[in-house]
Amino acid sequence: MVSEEKIPVHVTIIMDGNGRWARQRGEERLFGHNEGRESVRACVEYAVEKGIRYLSLFAFSEENWNRPRAEVEGLMHLMLKAIMDETPLFHKNGIRFRVLGDMSRLSKELRAQIDDCMTQTETYERLTLVIFLSYSGKWDIVQAANRFMKENPGKELDAGALEKYLATAGIPDPDLLIRTSGEERLSNYMLWQTAYTEFYFTDVLWPDFRKTEFQYALDAFSKRERRFGKI
Ligand code: FPP
């Protein structure tokens, strides 16, 4: 713990390394994703405890659709099950659940489960948990620009107008982005929204990223001086 702890409003995490974690144990990749689910729960609980208002997680990118079918199906099943199992935790802790991304590619069953959980939790304000599913930063910017043009024919687009059409409209930009597993890139995640985000990279694989590791990231954030382009 650092002397003066600054709590970020919005923490976003690129959860990486489930496959490697499983391989190190001679297991299938889905074994790693399953254990990664435990890290999701631990981080959600810790975010509530720390008073973080928004926690967002990059769970499945547009590019991830190109993984082997069995892994994609396994991950979608895991999402469905996680939402079903964790809804009571959302009620208990006042967590608003949201999913952002290209919903048209998800199964009807998963979409229905997501809609149900989002409706059940929409009035909660303690923590907003955002899951990015079938999402990519370029997709978001393009869909926002297209919707703007459709709804405002002949009008010129500016930054403020575009932001209102991004999938993340109404959600503050992330203060802190964490990526696990030693990779140090954005991988087509929130390209627009991370303009002034602080980045924290760790070699720890996602299934091993729990409360203590989360606190290390928060400690690092507390020490950063954010100037937003000013001096
Ligand atoms: C990246 O590891 C992880 C994913 C693509 C999936 C993340 C999903 C979960 C943690 C499951 C639970 C999620 C929720 C929201 C309940 P990787 O497969 O790219 O690992 P590798 O880089 O070691 O191969």
Image: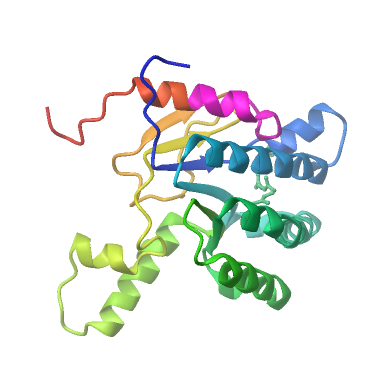
Q: Quadrant of residue 157?
A: bottom left
Residue 64 visible at all: yes
Nearest the camera: 155 or 6?
6
Q: Is residue 88 above or below residue 27?
A: below
Q: Is residue 182 visible?
A: no
Residue at 51% x, 60% y: name it. Answer: 124
Please determine whether, in this image, residue 136 is positioned above or below residue 104: above
Please tell me in which quarter of the rendered image ligand 1 is found.
top right
Q: Is residue 21 above or below residue 128?
A: above
Name the residue located 63 percent from the left edge and 55 percent from the top edge.
90
Give me the residue at 13% from left, 32% from top: 230
Q: Position of residue 201 (x, y in %)?
A: 49, 27
Left or right: residue 164 compared with residue 76: left
What residue lies at 73% left-to-right and 33% top-to-bottom? 20
The answer to which quarter of the image holds residue 140 is bottom left
Query: Where residue 50 sits in the image (x, y, percent)?
Result: 50, 35
The region drawn magenta spans 204-217
In this view of the protein, which residue sits in the foreground, 122 or 162? 122
Residue reaching furthest to the right: 26
Relative to 9, is 43 on the left or the right?
Answer: right
Instruction: Considering the whole magenta stretch, tell me its main secondary structure.
Output: helix
Residue 206 part of the magenta-drawn span: yes
| 209 drawn magenta | yes
The furthest residue to the front: 92
Q: Quadrant of the C terminus?
A: top left
Q: Position of residue 146 (x, y in %)?
A: 33, 75
